[in-house]
Image (cartoon, grey):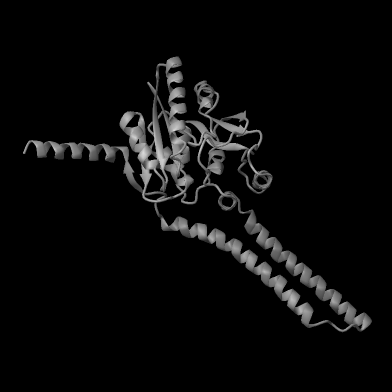
């Protein structure tokens, strides 16, 4: 038997979970009919949801033994959710996907065939359009990938998603990277391995609302830049050299004007402008250094990437204890 673990990080997904479960179980049954040697487990990660997502996990775990779940003590972010899912998955193959059905489960059989053939270690989807997104958001997304691929030695394919079907070997390689500040899109590319990119048309969420605002996506993009490139540090040095060069040229011009033409040097306005320019450049460069220093600071703390509050095993244990107490009351 070959076990396929399907990891699903969730944050406030109570509206879409019934739809996702219906679709994924249908795909699982189709694959088992075609490949009787396959078995499945569904591993849901509750990333500190504030709605009834955890209650949905309780119901699914009670009626389907293939369902497992991990509930965090608070919201740690999707990166922590994906890491926890990969770390606790038991399968020979591991699928990671979202619950909102923007990652269509219908692709999983094709992904399995690509990886099973031995030609690839990973199969993933790649969006060929961004229908449903605002033009501003799409423009920034495309620019991010272009900038990343220019300043980083790790190539990140434009449109490639977290929806991936991976071998255990590739997952173990990903788990060996234990950094606290994680950027999985970069990690997937950095570890290498043969990857099949499957093009598909973008689809909208089946229900609910996304937790990814423009602000959160912008912060996430900065995480990727600082995690996989030192170009901003070089930029700070370059700005310092340029500012010195501009200052030197300005000094030469002022000296020549004073010696050759007797033109008096304008003092107050020029001084204020230079102070503001140089001060702004200094603060900008210090800010870049501060970002890298903050990442180093968080890494050296050695804090866990996530904390578990509850799993399906603790739910079963509580159910058993409850039954034992009821039995003791009836039969003292």
Q: Position of residue 253 (x, y in %)?
A: 86, 74
**Vertical order, 155 against 3 (above or below):** below
**Vertical order, 166 against 110 (above or below):** below
Q: Visible in this render: residue 226? A: no
Dividing the image into 4 quarters, which one contains the C terminus? top left
Image point 55% across, 34% down: which residue? 102
In the rendered structure, the answer to whether residue 189 lies left or right of residue 170 reads right
**Vertical order, 329 against 48 (above or below):** above
In depth, the one of 137 and 250 nearer the eye is 137
Image point 71% across, 73% down: which residue? 276
Q: Position of residue 297 (x, y in %)?
A: 47, 60
Residue furthest left as drawn? 332
In depth, the one of 1 and 233 nearer the eye is 1
Q: Visible in this render: residue 206? A: yes
Q: Position of residue 302 (x, y in %)?
A: 41, 55
**Vertical order, 236 against 45 (above or below):** below
Disc count in the image?
A: 0
Dividing the image into 4 quarters, which one contains the N terminus? top left
Which image quadrant for residue 149? top right
Which image quadrant for residue 176? top left
In depth, the one of 256 and 291 nearer the eye is 291
Image point 40% across, 54% down: which residue? 303
């Amino acid at each position: 038997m070959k076990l396929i673990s399907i990891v699903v990080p969730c944050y406030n997904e109570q509206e879409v979970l019934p739809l996702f479960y219906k679709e994924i179980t249908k795909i699982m049954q189709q694959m088992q009919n075609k490949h009787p040697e396959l078995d499945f487990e569904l591993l849901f990660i509750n990333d500190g949801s504030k709605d009834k997502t955890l209650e949905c996990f309780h119901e699914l775990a009670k009626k389907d033994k293939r369902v497992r779940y991990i509930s965090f003590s608070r919201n740690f972010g999707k990166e922590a959710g994906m890491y926890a899912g990969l770390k606790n998955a038991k399968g020979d193959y591991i699928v990671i996907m979202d619950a909102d059905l923007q990652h269509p489960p219908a692709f999983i059989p094709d992904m399995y065939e690509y990886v099973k053939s031995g030609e690839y270690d990973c199969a993933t989807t790649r969006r060929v359009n961004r229908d449903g997104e605002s033009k501003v958001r799409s423009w920034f997304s495309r620019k991010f990938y272009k900038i990343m691929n220019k300043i980083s030695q790790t190539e990140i394919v434009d449109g490639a998603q977290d929806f991936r079907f991976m071998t255990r070997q590739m997952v173990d390689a990903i788990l060996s990277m234990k950094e606290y500040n994680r950027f999985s899109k970069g990690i997937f590319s950095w570890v290498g391995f043969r990857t099949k990119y499957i093009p598909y048309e973008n689809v909208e969420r089946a229900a609910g609302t996304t937790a990814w605002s423009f602000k959160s996506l912008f912060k996430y993009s900065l995480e990727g830049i600082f995690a996989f490139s030192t170009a901003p540090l070089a930029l700070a040095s370059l700005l310092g050299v340029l500012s010195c060069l501009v200052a030197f040229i300005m000094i030469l011009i002022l000296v020549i004007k004073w010696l050759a033409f007797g033109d008096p040097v304008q003092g107050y306005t020029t001084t204020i402008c230079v102070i503001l320019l140089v001060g702004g450049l200094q603060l900008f460069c210090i800010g870049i250094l501060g970002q890298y220093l903050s990442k180093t600071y968080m890494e050296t703390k050695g804090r866990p990437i996530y904390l578990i509050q509850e799993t399906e095993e603790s739910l079963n244990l509580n159910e058993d204890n409850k039954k034992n107490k009821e039995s003791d009351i009836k039969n003292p």
